[in-house]
Image (cartoon, rainbow, N blue to C red):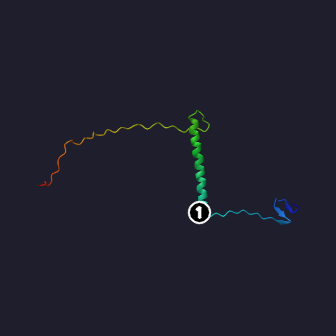
Amino acid sequence: MQKLGRNNKNELFWDGKPIVTRNQYVFTNYQRALAILAIIASLATILTGLNNAAVFMCGRGVNWLGCPLVSQPAPKIFLELPPISAPSATVQPKSGPKASN
């Protein structure tokens, strides 16, 4: 450990020679797009969780996350449809050639 040292810029030296540490990450365009998609999905998950927590806590009277806006229920609309007529019960026999004996 006698050979290990550092200078006033906090750079590491071993036996008077600088120790070079480089951690470079090189991403392809596909990896960058996937990383951005993962970040967006993570943020959406966090926001969904906060919304669910707000709804859950609001139902129990805890309002520090804020309660979601409650809208008025949509009016019920009933359409008047004409009655459906039932088909007649009589069945007409099909006319066709008669079998002869």
Residue 29, above or below 56: below
Residue 33: where, in percent of width, then height? Answer: 59, 60
Quadrant for the N terminus in the image: bottom right
- Residue located farthest toward the right when viewing the structure as drawn: 2
User: Could you say whether the residue bearing mark 1 is in a helix, strand or loop?
Assistant: helix
Residue at x 83%, y 63% (from the top left corner): 13
Which amino acid type is shown beneath numbered disc 1? Tyr
Residue 12, above or below 55: below
Residue beneath label 1, please? 30
Direction from residue 94 to residue 49 in the image, left or right: right
Residue 20: where, in percent of width, then height? Answer: 78, 65
Q: Quadrant of residue 3?
A: bottom right
Residue at x 59%, y 59% (from the top left corner): 34
Q: Quadrant of residue 52?
A: top right
Q: Nearer the viewer, residue 53 or 78?
A: 53
Quadrant for the C terminus in the image: bottom left
Residue 55: where, in percent of width, then height? Answer: 56, 38
Residue 78, above or below 35: above
Direction from residue 57 to residue 75 in the image, left or right: left
Residue 21: where, in percent of width, then height? Answer: 76, 63
Residue at x 57%, y 42% (from the top left corner): 51
- Residue located farthest toward the front when viewing the structure as drawn: 101
- Residue located farthest toward the top when viewing the structure as drawn: 61
Numbered label tally: 1
Q: Residues within 10 Å of mark 1 (few under 14, many from 20)?
A: few
- Residue located farthest toward the bottom when viewing the structure as drawn: 17
